[in-house]
Amino acid sequence: METQKRRIVLATFGSLGDLHPYLAIGLGLQARGHEAVIATSAFYRQKVEALGLGFHAVRPDAPDIEAHPELMKQLMNRWRGSEFVIRKWVMPGLRETYFDTLTAAKGADLLISHPLTYAVRLVAELQGIPWVSTVLSPISLFSHHDMPQLLPSPMMRILRALGPAGGEAFIQLMKWTGRTWCGPYRRLRAELGLPPVRDPLFDGQHAPTLVLGLFSELFGSRQTDWPTQTCVTGFPFYDREAAEAGLPPELAQFLDDGPPPIVFTLGSSAVMDAGDFYEQSVAAAQRLGKRAVLLIGRDPRNQPKQPLPPGIAAFAYAPYSELFPRAAAIVHQGGVGTTAQAMRSGRPMLVMPYAHDQPDNAYRVVRLGIARTLSRRKYNAERAAQELTLLLENPAYAQRAAEVGAQVRREDGVKAACDAIEARL
């Protein structure tokens, strides 16, 4: 039976890690004959439209990090980064976000929200448009039984020893901490004549009929206190900088010319607050006598200050799906998109988390037996070399990483998400 064409608006906000899963799903929906529209910051217009997807600009736009580099330090602060994103970036422009989303939603048959696109729920309720919410990582589901890893490990070990009661106490603490973050949301709901709802940071973020968990069951297994309407799809993968881009020819040649290198990357956000990560990583690779690939982004501050040693090369960008499987190990910041690609590659990893979901993502891959973790404060050449030695010389990490990679590659997050969306329609 021919599928009826529907207009589906996918709203997202943030870095490439927040955009790429929705591009993947949008392309999947488009291939099924639907009209998929990405509603996000104007900064991404060219990237989205080059793929043939619809686009609608929604404020706020991405900040100018080059002009204001201190912003990234605030965005990636371990303790206050999430508060800064919500209170200083998302909530002040919520009214503009609402009106832009309302315009994008005209004629839509379904709206799909990202955890930070709070206006989607407002538009869905006012316009009577069906709504599906998504989460990119398990931390957003805030389970008492599988509590988030945010505090330093000794405190978390104490809370975990208390079982669900410890998890409940921790989540109540999180709710208390965030209780004042969403005042503009509550005021706008009241102005629009909508009834009060639970805190949009927690239970209030979830759509009543379908919540898509856009991650692998290996990464976050279903918990009894998750919303019953949750569907875990597997990771929806997309990692192209441009529509037809692959490995840079110089990088492909470098990979062909020697043994698998260690890949050092900071994703698409932390790379703009790299500090001395790349210098320390070069020194760590030299201590180990290993080849290395540095993915340094386009921030000029990350350019090597002196010629790189033989066997070490730096590139602005490379698709993880093509690079990671050819690595000996991957060192990264723990963003969920980077973590997902590392899991799929079947290679062990060392995670140096910054903020937001990254400490929890690091905890999960360590728990899987495929990674080690090192705090940003302790990351230096000596400690990184020590951790990488343990990672590379213990065959259990490589074996388990290969097993996890094989299972993640068997999953089809895009198909599962599109199936669930069509069933909701």
Image (tube, rainbow, N blue to C red):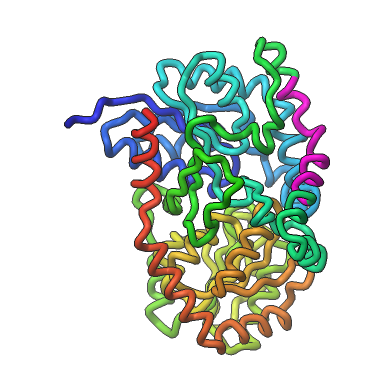
Image x and y of residue 29, in percent: 34, 37
Q: Residue furthest left?
A: 1
187 lies above or below 340: above
Examine the image and state in which quarter residue 154 appears.
bottom right
Q: Quadrant of the N terminus?
A: top left
Instruction: Examine the image and state in which quarter residue 239 appears.
Output: bottom left
Q: Is residue 171 magenta?
A: yes
**Would you say residue 115 sits in the magenta stretch?**
no
Q: Compared with residue 78, is residue 389 higher up or lower down, i.e. above or below? A: below
Q: Relative to the observer, which residue lies in front, 250 or 56? A: 56
User: Does residue 70 appear to the left or right of 189 in the view shown?
Assistant: right
> Residue at (40%, 35%) from the top-left corner?
49
Out of 82 and 380, give the one closest to the viewer.
Answer: 82
Relative placement, left or right, of 19 versus 420 is: right
Expressed as whole percent of the image width and height from the top left, the position of residue 373 reads 67, 71
For image coordinates 60% across by 77% down, the residue present is 308
Which residue range is magenta in the image? 170-186
252 is higher (above) or lower (below) than 19: below
- Residue 391 lies left or right of residue 176; in this view the side is left
Q: Residue at x 48, y 77 (%)?
A: 400
> Relative to the observer, which residue lies in front, 220 or 68?
220
Number of marks drawn: 0
Q: Main secondary structure of the magenta part?
A: helix
How far from the left and from the top, in percent, is residue 279? 69, 73
- Residue 403 lies, with reference to residue 133, above or below; the image says below
Residue 70 placement (x, y as % from top left): 78, 48
Q: Residue at x 65, y 53 (%)?
A: 357
Q: Quadrant of the C terminus?
A: top left
